[in-house]
Structures are given as structure tokens and as C-alpha cells.
Amino acid sequence: MSKKSLQLSTGKIYAFVLPGFILFIFSLMLPLLISLFISFTNWKGQPNMSFVGLKNYAILMKDVKFWLSFVNNLKFMGILLVTQIGLAFIFAIFIQSKSIYYREAHRRIIFLPAVLAPIVVGMIWQIVYNNDYGMIASVMRFIGFENFKVLWLDSPKMVIFSISIALTWQYVGQFTIIIMAGMQNINSSILEAAVIDGAGIIRRSVSIVLPLLKNTISVCVLMVISGVMKMFDLVFSISGGGPGRASQITALYAFDQAFKVNKLDYASAVAVVMVILSLLLIAIFRLFMSRLGGADE
Amino acid sequence: MNNKIKQNTPGSIIAKIVMNIIAISISISCIYPIIWLIYSSFKTKGEFMTNTLALPTILHFENYARAFHLGNLVTSTFNSTFYVITNVVLVTIVATISGYFLARYDFKGKKFIYYSYLIGFLVPIYALLVPVFLQFRLLGLINTRISLIFPYFAMQVTLSTFLVESFIRGIPRSLDEAAAIEGCSVGQTLLKIIFPLSSPAIATIVILISLQTWNEFGFSAVLIRDVSLRTVSVAIQSFRAGLQLEYTYMMAALVSVSIPIITLYLVFSKYIISGITSTGIKE
Amino acid sequence: MKKIIVMIMSLTLFSGVLFAKNDQEKPKTGNEVIEISMMDIWVEVEALYKPLNDAIARFEAANPNVKIIRETVPSQAYLVQAPALGAANELPDLVASNGSMTRQFASTGAILSLQDAINKDANWKKRVYSSAWVEHTYEKEAYAQPLAEGNYGYIVYNSAIFEEVGVKEFPKTLDEFMVVCEKIKKAGYIPIALGDAQLWPADSINFSSFVNNFVGNAWTESILNKDGKAKFTDKEFVAALAAFQELATKGYMNENMISITHSESLGLYMSGKAAIRGWGDWEEPVLVETAPEIAAVSKVAAWPGPAKNAKATGSYEASSAWGFSIGSQISKEALPYAIDFLANYVVSDEFAKYMIEEKYQFVPWTMPKFDESKLPQITLDRIAFKAQPDSTACMNYDAVLDAAVKDVYQRGLQSLLIGAVTPEQLAKDIQAEFEMSL
């Protein structure tokens, strides 16, 4: 770097950078440290607290309810990896194609739900799924399937899937656009040929296109992983984690432990473990990708 | 390759029609729930219950009046707007300054700052609900006008910094070197050279911050008690409770709080799409 | 550089001004007017909305130097918000709390004990039924003034549907009850309407009284006293869970019982689609006003119990689940006024008269004379039902269990109803959490 003309004393740089950084530390890092501290105590809001060592973590390790919610997070990840990225890939091929009219309009429409508040999306889908006057039940009645009935939010087997549909609806546009951006780097004649000439070639070109999109897809996978770990409002408003605990996720569990059950000490431990788990997931995926990348090159 | 498409063989025309139909149905299924929500919000309760899909016969604007009254939406709209503005100003300033220094200078502790931001970016934000609550409880900061400013800042500053940083890397270094040679101080360079040149990136982060701050729910639910300080996302929660559930009022409220962001989206969709997309690219 | 500093400074100043403004608002009240903040769940459509406003008006007329600022939050939001505020020790001066909340707040010092004030005020102490304090007592001290002597967990059923399927009398045992449900189901109706989206209805309005026929009052008392005699794994409790689950798995409850709310299940009953519904006294005015034709054929009964070894019969809940407690952040000047408000304006004849004549509900303090002709038939039926010798008043688990146990229990009931957990397993889970709270 030619820094001759761009030299500044460290102090001067700090004068610029530190105010913002300190605010960041105060708003994000300090709460985490406080939580870490509280998680070693028995403090539930009473005037005095005492240290209990690793007790909260020992309970957490054996807490079936917590690990069940973590498994639910993983289930969401599994479903969303397929639905969001898979559908987005198909959508992208379509919208990218020069045979489609008003491509820009399609792009904007598909993307629209991504800007809505998750809490609003949760409430919308709650009405959509209602068995008596929900949108789906009404559409089915309208086209003659009077007896069509799915217990979208009442069946423990369905509920994660139902919520995943809502999530896919909200975010598929975002993934579509990312994948489209990735596709723009690929010679477009491959795509065109794939689309024009029918299904057989679509399949064949998928096997050509997909490897070329490796980096883009890996970005999408990371987004799904971190997206699911920070999910909260949508599930909160659509099912509250129910029926029972069938759709409870770690963020909701921490919330319940802190604010419903008032175990502030234990909830702190849950929050700390949540951070560790999601950083771990991302690290594992990165490692996996770099292994894969290494093998390629 | 262009010739190939322009050949109007019967097969390719049919393929074209089929593909357009599929594309249109994809778009419709994406937008229909929103359209349905909007027109249903103008119905009476009876109309909605008896024929859920039909269009309203008369537009019942009083649903909106009722929703604004019941949900205290005027106050909460003001509050959310307040948080959007403060957060945009705060994050934009911090992100641009730190983005610039991270992109242009080497200094002691740079790595530390960079990796702190990176960890902050990777931490699932709602793992912070309890921690932030505890911290604010200890500091007595719960339920004040400024309570939400901190978590909202934390939510946005990392990504915004990275977006600006990578944009500034693309600006030729010679420009600020020239400014420095002409005697501009760093502050002047930032204001006169970097701010204007990175306006596309800044526009993107401004809109992203606005959207996400407006939409936030968790922190607002936990840190705020007074009705007078409540934000829109918490205000609409109050509709799914009470003795009798009034779907039409609830839908009117949902539309009301979504209209501002839908409008923002329609006007600035270019920035929003590129911004949210780069959320991913940045990883 | 300077400009940026100016910008940052002005920003700080900007937020400083706002912060300061917020702070100034409070001390301003010190000299002239004393402000008392109050927060509760009784929004405009609820029965307690108006009598509380009336009590405030009477209080403010008598104390022109005091202002009560009331805020109502719908129950679903309140059940999240109030515990969070309690955990933050940021409760308002007067705060509505149910039994579980009262004890939780008391245990962390977020609310003040009322016991001294009650002991000093002979009139207050004499007037309120001593049984009403039980749910709001923590370590032998009362922490909240209960508001209603609520009756719930009994059954209201549509006798027209019963006649249609050829049933004359409400069944006394569970086996007979199942037979009746089967007939109703075959006739195309929903036998039992339930809406548990808020997590408490399956418990408070249904299971708390349902289980009492199996376990009896002494068992619940032992749980409440934590003396270790009663266990959730006791066979009677497990049998009740199993029977309750059977009602759902046999299809006697509406399929969407988890995703709809309690008020939506009321809709199912009032539209004549459902025959039976666990009931609360506050719903009687709604039924009479909204669906008079259904009200005319509605009758009152209790959950049937097991044919053998029933520890109680005709159980219904008599509970003063909700009350007002005083947040510990209250100022010294405001405290005596807040106590005066509870002791003389909430606990008052005006309040009681309104509740019984307009809302058909009793209060937990001595009642004034009231106009019985104002009560609808369904309320008279309920009063008659309570007076029957084989009716048993019992407690509401929602109000007596610790929050952590309640969370396991209420979410567990949902899992039980959808068949995701066995009665034995659920009993074990609840017992495990209960033992942690001992």
C-alpha cells in the first residue's frame, strides 16, 4: 500500500473509530458478558445473588426441552434448505429466461414479502391457515374440495412444515435474486438452451449449472443457517411454539425461561449456549465448504 | 444464441406460453395473500366470515378508524418513526466512518475491531433478548425513550459497516490521496469525497436500516412498557386477544403498519433488493 | 473533522434532551398532584373494565390531589409483559396479578406485602372473605386484593342438541359421558368445544376441575403446601390425564383446539356447532347478549367423574385468581393512597353491585343487597348448581402452581390432547419440575 499521503496517527484514527465501536461493545458485547456472568449465579431478580458455578449448564445439558427446541431449529434448517434454495433455483431459471415477459415485475413481486415484518407475516399466515375462514380452506371450498382439511397448526407433525411454508413464502424471493445474481456470471446460453429445449435438458443443465453456482449456493446455505438461528417473531406470533412444544425453537425457549418462568439465571445460560451453538454450526459449515473447495482445486 | 430464441417454431411458442403462465402463477401465489389481506380488511366481520374470498361490497374504512383507536396506532407509528430516524442517523454515521477506516488504514487493533464486528454479525440477534434485558435492568434503562436505540444500533451496525467498507474498497485510493495532498483533513476527505462517492452504498443501508427497525418486535416487546413508548409491531399484537377476536380490525391494523414499508419498497426496490441480496453476498 | 464532531455532539445532545425530558416528567408530579400508575388486563370489552373506572372516578373525586393513570393491556400480551416487568422490577404502582404472578413477584420483592395494612384496617379485614386471600398469599402474607370470586370450570351445554340425540339428563360418570359424546359426534356436532391457543383454557377452564373429581381437594392442598404427600405421578392424577386425553383422541373435541383461542371456541358454542363447553362465569353476559336463542337452551353441569374411586363430585372452580398488588417502585407519598384505593374503592358496595347486576359475577367480599330479577336464567342455574350438596368447589391450578411447573403442565396438556405424550410421561415431567421447585 502506498500510504505516504494517507498517514494518520493511531490516536487520530481512534478518535474516529472508537466512539462507534464503544457504542457497539456497550450494545452487543457487554450484554453477552453480563449474561455469561449471570449464568454462573442463581440470580432471578432477588436482591442478593450467589455463585453456583456450572450448575445452570449442568441442568441445561440434561434439559430435554432445550435440546428438543434445538432439534426443531435443525428441522427448520433441513426443510428450508430444500424449499427456499430449491424453489429459488427453479424460480431463478424461469425469471432469468428471456422468454418471460415483464421479468422485472416478477422479480419485484416475488421479493415483496421479504420486506414485511415477520410478526405481520406470522399473523397473516395464522389467518391463512384457519380451518373455518382461512384463505386455504376457502380456496379449497371454492374449487370444490369441501372435505379438504389439513390441521396446519394443530398437528405436531404438520406445524413445523406449515411454518416453513410461511417462511419460504417470505424469503424465497430473496434467495431467487441472490441465485440470479450468481447465474449472471454464467454463460447465459447454457441456461437458455436448458430452458428452451425441454425437461430432459433442464435436468442435464442443472447438473451443469449447479456446480457453477457452488459459491452462491453456499452463501444461501449460510443464510438459511443463520436465519433459522435468529428466528423468533414469526414463530412467536404464528404458533407460540405450540402445540405443546412441537414448534418451539431455542430463541423462544430462552424467552419463556426468562419472562414466563422468571429463571433469569437459567435463561442466561440458554442464551450463551445458543450463541455457541450457532457459531459452531457456521464454523462446521465453513470447514465443510473449504474441504470441498480444496478438493476441487 | 439470440437467433435461436427468435426462431418462432411452434414448439418454442408453446414453451414460451407455458413458461409465462408458470411465471405468472408463481408471482400470483406470492402476492395473493397480501392482496387478500388488503381487501378483506375493508369488509364487515359478517361478510368476512360468510364469504372469505369475495371482494367487499362496500369499503368499510371505519375498520381502519377502529383499528387505529384500539391499537393506539398513531402513537406507535410516531414511536417507530422516531426509532427509524435515530437508528438511520446513528448507524449511517458510525458505519461510514468505521467502514472508511477499516478499508483504508492499517492501525493497531484493527483486527480486533474487525473480528468483533464479525462476531457481532454472526451472533443470532434474539439470543441477545435476555442479555440486553438483564443489562438494562441493572442500568435502570428499561422502559425509556432511548432503551431501544442500543439494541437496534447493535442489530444494524455490523452489516452496514461491512457493506460500506467493501464499497469504499472499490473507490480508487488515488481520490482521497489527492484530497490529502491538497490539504484536506481526514474529516474533510470523509465529508467531501467519501460520503458523496459512497452514496449508493449509503442509500442501501439507510433503506435496510429503516425497514428492519420498523419491523423489529422482540426487543420492543421486552424493553418497553408504556403505551406511549410502544412500537407498531408490539401494538398489533394486542389484536389477537380479548374477549372477541375481530379479524377485520386486526387485518386493517396489519395493513396499516405494512403500508409504509410496502410504499418504501415500491419506491426504492432497486436499493432494497441489492441491499438484502448483499446481506448474503457479504458472507 | 469538526463537522463530524459537531454532528456526533448534536446527536448526543438530541438523545440527551429526550432522555432528560422523560426524567423530568416524573418528579414534576411530586408537589402538586400524586400520580399512581395502574396496569391491568381488563380492556374495554371485559366485565371489570367499567367498575374499575368507576372506582377510580369515585376515588379521584374524594382525593383531588391524586391521579390514577390506568393502562389496559389485552390478556395475551399482558401474560408476557407483566412477568417481564416483574423480572425487571419495573412494575407499575397498581398491577393486576394472578395467583402465580403474585407469588412470583412477591418472591423477588417486586411487589409489597399488604398484610400490615390489612391487619391495621379492621373493616377491610372483616369485609373480605378470608378464603379469597389464599391464592395471593406468599409466606403467610397477602400480597394482592382479589377482585372477583370467580366460578369456572363447570360445563354449559346445549340441551337442544342433547334432546336431539335422545339424552335427557347430563351424564354423571365418565363412561356415560363418553357414550353421549359419541352420539353427539355421530349427529354431526362437535361434542366439546375447546380453544387453547393461549395455553391456559385447557387447564383453567377444563382440566383443573376435571381432575379434582379424580384426586379431590386434599390432594391439591398438599401440592399447594408442597408437603410432599401428593405427587403428580399418583395414579388418580394419571388416570385423569388419560381420561382427558381420551376425550380428544376419540374426536370429541374440535380438531383445531390448539390453534383457536378461548373466545373462538365460545363462537363454536354460540353458533350451535358445539354441544358442550367448559365455562367461566364472565362469559354468561356474552352468551345472553350475543346468542339469546342458544342461551335459552343452555344448561349448567359439572364435569363427570370416574365411576369408581371418585374423590369428589361435581367439581367446579371457585377462585379469586386475579387481584391487584402494589409494585415496590411506588413512591412513599403514593403508597397510602394506593392502599386506600384498594381497601375502600375497589372493595366497595358499588363495585359489588355492578358486578352482580350487570355482569352476573360475585366479588370476594360481603355483598350488598342486589336485584335478583336482573340475573338471566343461566346465572340462576349456576347459582343453584353451586348450592347442590354434591357440588365441590376446588382450586384453579393456573393460579396456584409455580410458573415453571405451570409452563411444563400447560404445554404438556396441549401435547397430551394431540397425543404427542402419554399420560404417564407427562405426569413424570410435571413431577420432575415440581420437585425442582421444592
Image (cartoon, rainbow, N blue to C red):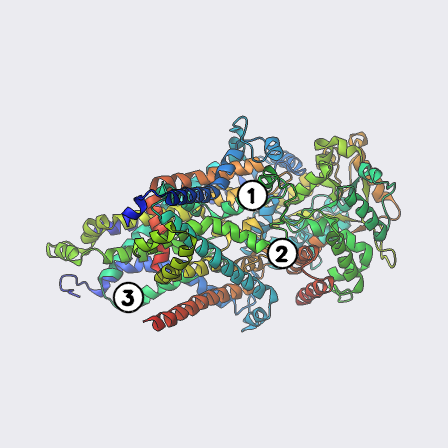
Percent across and percent down for residue C348 are: 71, 38
| Residue to which mark 2 is pinned | A156
Q: Amino acid at mark 2?
A: Pro
Instruction: Give the Cα separation between the discs numbered 3 and 1.
Output: 50 Å
- The answer for which chain carries disc 2 is A
Q: Is residue A297 visible?
A: yes
In the rendered view, tell whether residue B233 sits above or below residue A294. Answer: above
| Residue to which mark 1 is pinned | A128
Label 3 with label 2: CB-CB less than 8 Å: no
Q: Secondary structure at mark 3?
A: helix
- B217 or C48, which is in the foreground? B217
Q: Are marks 3 and 1 on the same chain?
A: no
Q: Amino acid at mark 3?
A: Lys
Residue at image location 46% in from the left, 65% down from the top: A278
Q: Residue furthest top?
A: B58
For label 2, the crowd category at 10 Å Cα-Cα, with few meaning under 14, some 14 to 19 and many 20 or more, is: many
- Which of the two marks, 3 or 2, is nearer to us in this view? 2
Residue at image location 53% in from the left, 47% down from the top: A122
- A199 or A273, which is in the foreground? A199
Q: Earlier in the sequence, mark 2 or mark 1?
A: 1
